Image (cartoon, helix red, strand yellow):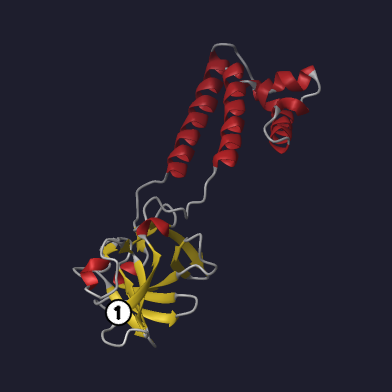
Amino acid sequence: MKTILASFTYLMILCLCSTIKGSDDINNALHPCVHIIDEFNHIDISSALGDKKTLRDTDSNYTYYFSGCKDFKLSDLNLPGINITNTASLLKVWPNSTKEKSVVFNYTVLGKAENIKWHKEGSMHQLIYNISNMTTLPTVKLLCDNEPAPFIKVLDTKSNQLIFSSQQACIITIHHGLSGGSIFLIMLLVFLTIYLVGGGLMLYFIRGARGVEVIPNIEFWRNLPSLVKDGLMFLLAGCKPTFVSTSESYDRI
């Protein structure tokens, strides 16, 4: 039993090291439509536009088209001068003033769905289009609104900053059952109860132990402070066994 406990302690240290090394930012969304905030909260804008393909807003001569986390075909706009084979999630359009007889439009694809990166600034979540050839990244700020009809509003045409207002921009909270941590604690308490009570009864009736000797593996618990110390040293050393300088410390680990 003592060997099992020592092995369990060492495995817990290794698991902690693995968690430290392999931890990842939970805010990295697995899909451009969904942003996982934590275990219970997320944002899903996959159906934010409803039956509309795009939302648009105009500031000065610039018109912006936004299709959420899905790309739309530029040919759907039916604008002269627009490349009909291209797609975009965020598009900037303005008239070409050099054309006199007919209006021809210039445009810039500010981003596609695959370029979307979720970001949080203060209390507001944002969609940032991570385009390598742009010095200022286009940003769509999400505004949680109870109005049924979604809309966009241009904030700045130079830095391409917009606000997207929708009910779907609100944080969705899902209440699960017991979390993984709660289940682990319950299992740990059950194990410790069985271990202490069951082991103590066996030592009392079978071996005739009395006093503190009824505590299972009493020598292990007496050495626990030194085991904890070695474990902390192991973690501070970057989970490398190079800190072990004596055979006693090595045996304890």
Task: Measuring from the top left, give residue 62's x and y in whole percent.
Answer: 38, 82
Which image quadrant is residue 199 in? top right
Viewer-closest of 125 and 113: 113
Q: Residues within 10 Å of mark 1 (few under 14, many from 20)?
A: some
Q: Residue 34: give x, y in percent of width and height.
A: 36, 57
Residue at far right of view: 245
Name the amino acid, label 1.
Answer: Val
Picture residue at 73% right of the left edge, 20% below the top: 250
- On the picture, is 105 further left or further right than 204? left
Q: Which residue is mark 1?
A: 104
Q: Can you give x and y, in whole percent of width and height, for residue 196 in the image?
A: 54, 27
Instruction: Name the foreground residue: 206 vs 71.
Output: 71
Measured along the vertical axis of the image, is residue 31 above or below residue 241? below
Name the residue rendered at 48%, 63% in the picture: 119
Which image quarter is the C terminus in? top right
Across and down, in percent, residue 153 comes to 37, 80
Q: Is residue 97 above or below residue 207?
A: below
Frontmost residue, 47 versus 71: 71
SS assignment at label 1: strand
In the rendered image, which quarter is residue 17 located in? top right
Query: In this view, which residue lies farthest toward the top?
Result: 207
Residue at 45%, 60% (x, y): give it: 118
> Which one is nearer the viewer's eye here, 93 or 7?
93
Callout count? 1
Q: Tell me, yes or no, if residue 144 can be seen here.
A: no
Picture quadrant where residue 53 is located: bottom left
